[in-house]
Amino acid sequence: MNRRSTGLSSEENSLNQPRFDRKLFGKRITKNHHLASPRLLVLPILTGYYRNSSATIHPHQARAMTKPTSPPSHPPELWVSARRFADYLARPLDRFLQIEAASGILLLATTAIALAWANSPWSASYEHLWHTPITFGIGKLSLTQPLHFLINDGLMVVFFFVVGLEIRREIHEGELSEAKRAALPVAAALGGMVVPALIYSALNWDPAARRGWGVPMATDIAFAVGVLTLLGKRVPAAIRVLLLALAIIDDIGAIVVIALFYSAALAWSGLALAVLGVAGVIVMAGFGVRRAPWYILPGAVLWGGLWVGGVHPTIGGVILGLLTPVRSWYGTRGFLATAERAIEDFRRRATRDHAAHDLVVPLSELEQARREAVAPVVRLEAALHGWVAFGIMPIFALANAGVDLSGVSFGTPGAVGVVLGVTLGLVLGKPIGIVLASFLAVRLGLAALPRGVTWLGVGVVGVVAAIGFTMAIFIAGLAFTDPQLLGIAKLGVLVGSTVAGILGLLAGRMLLSSPEARDDHALTPADAEASTEH
């Protein structure tokens, strides 16, 4: 079509075309870059964030192109009244999930339910439920294990996988990426693991009881963050960052302890199978396989190899997390360039009356760009965090926190030492170890306190980190084969974690100043992380 036939200049014709508003789209990315996933970043492109001049479009052009419009608010097959009713029912749940301490509250609730159930007239049903046999297999190849095994050795693999992802990300770009930044949380975590273990060992000389020295070493990050959240704005961002980094290193220590001290006699045939699974993951990554479902098979081989080899299979989750790619393929710029190109292709196909299946090609390009805009380690952590925090961990608590108090006997050999060792190891050992190790690291010049963190704040971190719960109960299940000692150890974990949580709230109220009284605190987590670089 020439210029004369349209009556418009080439510049006017170009203005008349719907164009991608880079400025508007860029503002939305900049404003919410820490919240929006690439999937959400694609939506504004497809739902009307285009600008069009008010010039009149030639009739031939109007027939040849489809003007971008926002889609309806609901799918065409939706029952609107049913959706409104579902939204009404889900609104309280949505508000609850927005609370930062929601996962800790849910854990506390499931723990209370487990304790009440195990000590009720229906306690037999509690035990019977977790010993229900579950069978997996095809033909003669089958595996039958109780439901409790499926939770502790199956679902918890996902929990440890997310832990591995967090460790991998922190090593790449977080508090563990530089020696100077990692020095303080590493020192604090080591002190918080060694001192509780020493206290426990000093109180337990019986060989059966002494195996529980690893129980008071752990920190439950969900409960710990929940306590800090209840303290509100009294807690500077730098203290939160320190606690998170300390908990991640604490998890590393717990993983090492499980692998070295709480695994059965090694079977080399099983370990060879595990190595084969790891090799499969590495080879697939080398061939550029980026979709997570393809790694389920080598991950299952790794799990089976570790289980047969005598190493607790949850370690496989950590290994897979550490092997997850930490660099994005497209990145932000690549995503924007690919999205703009795919949208232009989509527009051309749509305006030329292509069949609907022809639109799949540009949409596939958009989907790949969305998936690869961020690193797999970030994408998988974000996708699984909710399932772990609001699903796996509460199920684990429900299955493991039910201690029948009527069946607990302190007359069992070693029982008193176990409960005292676990309780005192958590309540006293954790704070003393964290504060003492941090003080020595700073005095020796190995580390420095981040901006906004005082020694009183380090003390509060130490008290809050004494909440052991999830990992502590998990290690207790590995350490004790005697049901009596296991029940005593769980009781010590529950008592110690409860006391630590209450003391953490009181210490935070008394020792942390209000935000109005502080003028040197880091305002954001990014500021807090940056302040540890010096």
Image: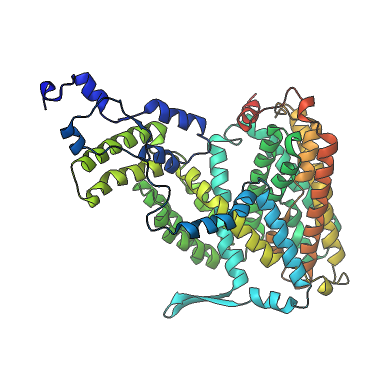
Camera-nearest residue between 51 and 272: 51
x, y (%) of residue 206?
82, 65
Please, which colouring scheme is shown? rainbow
x, y (%) of residue 93?
61, 54
Camera-nearest residue between 407 and 440: 407
Residue at screen point 69% across, 40% down:
243
Side of 91 where 465 appears, left or right: right
Q: Say if residue 201 shows up in the picture.
A: no
Image quadrant holding the N terminus, namely top left
x, y (%) of residue 323?
48, 48
Camera-nearest residue between 51 and 267: 51
x, y (%) of residue 107?
69, 57
Camera-nearest residue between 529 and 72: 72
Which quadrant holds residue 87?
Answer: bottom right
Q: Is residue 335 above or below residue 490?
A: above
Q: Is residue 357 above or below residue 267?
A: above
Side of 225 where 510 appears, left or right: right
